[in-house]
Image (spheres, rainbow, N blue to C red):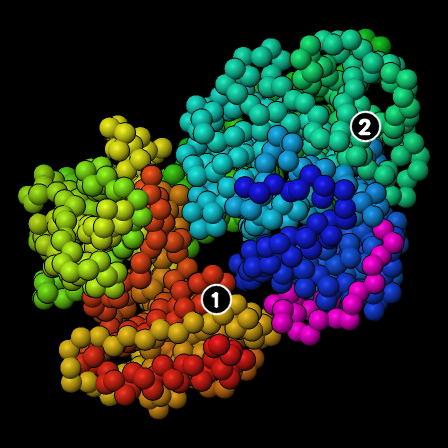
Amino acid sequence: MTPLPSTSWDQRLDQIVRGWAHRRPDATAVVSTELTVTYRQLDDLADRYAADLIERSVRPGDVVPLAVPQSVTLIALMLAVAKVGAAYAVVDPDWPDDRLRGVLRNMRSPIVVAGAEVRLPDDRPRWTPPDAAQRIGTPPPRELPEPPTGPADPCCVLFTSGTTAEAKCMVTPHRAVARLFVPEATVTFGPGSVVPQLAPLQWDGSVLEIWSALLTGATLVLVADPLLTPADLRRMIQRDGVTTMWLTSSLFNTLVDVDLAAFTGLRQVMTGGERLSVPHVRGFLTAHPDIVLINGYGPAENTVFTTTHRIRPQDCAVAGGIPTGRAVPHTEVFVLDDARPVPPGQPGEVCVAGAGLADGYLGDPVATARSFVEVDIDGRRQRVYRTGDRGLIDDTGVLHYLGRMDRQLKVRGRRVEPVAVEHVLAQVAAVAQVAVVPRRDRAGNCLGLVAFYTTGDGRPATAQIRAAAARQLADYELPDAFVHRATMPLTANGKTDLRALQEQCADAIQPSQHRARAGDMPEGTLATVVEVFAAALDIEPDAVDVDSSLRALGGSSVSAIRASALLQQRGWAVPAVQVLGAGSARELARWLDEHAPSTDLDAAAGTGRFVPLTGMQQGFLMEHLADPTNLSGHCLLAWQVNGPLDVAALDQAIDDVVSRHGSLRAAYRLDPEPGAHTGPATCPAPRLQQLVMTGPPDLDAAVTALRTALSRPFDLECGVVLHARHMRLDDMRALVGVAVAHIAFDGWSESVFARELSQAYSARRTGAAPRFDTPPPSLPELSTGRPSGKAATRHRQYWANQLRAIPALPLARGSTPGLHHHEFRLDEADVAQLRHTAAKYDTTLFTALVASYGRALGAATGATDFGVGVPVAQRTGDLVDRAIGCLINMICLRIRPTTWDAEYAAELADTIMHAMQADVPFAEVVQILKPPRSSRPPLYQTLFTYQDTVPAHLDLAGTTTTALAVAHLGIPTELLVEVWPDHGGLRYVFTAQADAVSQDQFLQIVAAQRDDLGSLGCTLS
């Protein structure tokens, strides 16, 4: 990786990013679900937004509030504010009004940047910026004036809690951020690194995530769902290539507890925010010795990290816990007692100095003067921040954290002052006394807060107090429970006995009164939810009130992530945000019954080693039995290998992968009922067979020969579902090809197969057996359940109504066998234009592509009503994400092409959304509709697929490999159109059955597609 040049760190953030835009203009800078931008595009976007800000009178030195959700637009706005010489402050519109009002009051800016629908308690003019997708490719602004600001000036305002209800606003200079990413830092970033953005945008964790990528030429991935489950983590690693991430220690612990293998594929994990748990760290290091684990310590007032420490196994035996490490570059750490340094090994208050310090608290000179002080150290006058943490520096110069000197806590990685929470609660008229103490788990970690209170009239006022707290406190500051007491316990000197109250926290959540009678015991799905809630909250099941929400029972976002993962282990695929948002355990159980896919492993397993087939698999099997020479079910993978290929090791590696996955070992039979059978094999295992190249080593001819060799039929009933071939071109070049039956394979499986084959080959060429991190899911575990009851009935009715009497697509038939083939490419500018067009009508790129294809078919065939098939992945959990198998369904979109406008865009988007949600196997949809018998495929005669799966990268140790595009041997319908992401652009691949579509008609459809894309602004250059 190329690190940030050492001479570059002391600049404004926008200047460093512009440097990368000049050095690596086409490198990917930011990826979101809707938009991907390069460094050049990001810098250009920031210029356009900066011109907009200047036009609206934003000036150097202003603090610009940004009430904009996580998006490429927001990232570009942050840079734009810096280009003007101002500082950004991302504010959360969901904060209580009093907090928002106090925060905004101190920000000097002529405008507030916010969405039109955002409500803010501020009277300043509001500017709603156009979406980034709409700005890409628009004319650049006139040259921007260079602001009179430098690296010592503010770049952003970050937030943390104070001792009152108002948040502290820390003014952070550019160099405080940039210092973190110099080459000598413990944590390394650079081109090739991919970092997800998960932390709340108001806190310093987001500064680490965003700028670690953009200041080092890496890639930032914007994660839409902030509640990270193990399944989400696996998808990010596989789909987005995430290499490095920051996790609060509580979230790190949760992921280690519920799915330790989910970290596989990462290079580096940073964790901290609270004292690390030694058992969790030890478990991680044992499972992932090759992943760098960093302990990051530091207050937000010193911008993210003050010290870092690469954790080694021996650190788990250090008395007092995992060390917090040495100071990051351009930072100094002192341990002081009464403003004087203490000797090594002696405890004191941790104080920090250097380039990372904030300028102070915005609008609060008193708090600034109290926390940022000047002291004499070794004859030098130093400005330091007093952290309030106790620590010591050992004889080797390593800092060890010993706890707090006051009552400050960390709740889920965020600083909370119990005094501030008490201050808010004490304002409630009914409250006489109040004390807030931490609720801890068995390991001593702070799970949340419990508020104990007394009232003047002796009567409880919990509802009133809770409502007042919700109006003024942030979500993470809200106590999990409010406990009324007649009196407070006192210490010997007459003060409230906080220790005694903390010992009573376990009793704050009482066993449910809703299940006092045996007949009230929960059953079925509700019983599962109660069990999961109890496990996620570390309480007894009897303490779970079925009519209370997870949050009301003391849960948090971390609890929701844990509950989501536990539900997934029990067969329910449910997002963590759904768990957290459910009004009660009972409500979540109802939602699971009606919406969430489930896996009944016992039912799916059937008897013995038999697993029922899905509807798609039954279709593939019927086609194979009707015509074993039909090659439309062959999935092809091929690579060119440069370097010495160990053929024996590759042969063994293929056997290793096949042996791991039941789908590749199963025999697929109709009798006694359609199923995959994994009993003793009746056919030999697949072997890597050699092809001999005749004639000169011509690559095109070799690929054709490889394709022909892979066209042998499979024997599904015997269990032959894979062919493998290799061909030497010369001493240092070879081709490797694999064909897998679609009944056992899909697009997502390609990357899993290539990754495991690479791992097995690496081991086998050294004479060792491969050691995979996790066992693969079994066939029963892959037998995905579907909605039942009312939800299933509703879904079937949708398809009956949507596709009734759908006409066939009129295609002029051909007279020759074989396939027609044609390709063309859209470049990055074309794709940006399509995204702009989609955003203009508030829809997605996929919707725009489908609409364009539908109009092209209408123009070429004259059809006004027809079906288009779209394959949909059925992978909803961490197990299936690492599986090889056929886990897809087909949906049929009814297309009635018309002019591309807002009305049609909304109508088609609605059609796609409902089709995705109406989860019924396609074979069952056909049975419901009973279309007239015909030699043509039912309901649709064309497939449109947007291939967004992870590329199948083969990494054979000691060689370099290149994936080869191999033409299909056959296709499952008359006309197939595939759209592949291609280095920022899109590659269109058209394939048609030559006997079903004439050559003229085929070329007319291709031309109509090009014309329609041209009408949307694409140049197809």
Q: Secondary structure at mark 1?
A: strand
Q: Position of residue 850 (x, y in %)?
A: 43, 74
Q: Which residue shows up at 54% across the image and 12% down it?
A: 317
Quadrant of the image occupied by residue 521: top left
Q: Residues within 10 Å of mark 2 (few under 14, many from 20)?
A: many
Residue type, label 2: Ala
Q: Residues within 10 Å of mark 1 (few under 14, many from 20)?
A: some
Q: Quadrant of the N terminus?
A: top right
Q: Is residue 143 magenta?
A: yes
The foreground one among 906 and 394 is 394
In terms of sequence position, does the residue under pointer 2 or pointer 1 come before the other? Answer: 2
Residue hosting label 2: 353
User: Tag on residue 985?
Assistant: 1
Residue type, label 1: Gly
Q: Secondary structure at mark 2?
A: strand
Compared across the picture, whether 831 is left or right of 932 comes to right
Q: Position of residue 527 (x, y in %)?
A: 41, 38
CA distance separating discs 2 and 1: 47 Å
Compared across the picture, whether 927 is left or right of 76 comes to left
Quick check: 145 above or below 765?
Answer: below
Q: Position of residue 995 (x, y in %)?
A: 18, 81
Quadrant of the image occupied by residue 969: bottom left
The foreground one among 671 and 306 is 306
Q: Which residue shows up at 67% across the image and 13% down it?
A: 396
Quick check: 627 above or below 647?
Answer: below
Compared across the picture, whether 433 is left or right of 263 comes to right
Magenta region, residue range: 128-149
Q: Which residue shows up at 14% across the image and 39% down it?
A: 608
Q: Which residue shows up at 60% across the image and 74% down it?
A: 840
Q: Is residue 945 magenta?
A: no
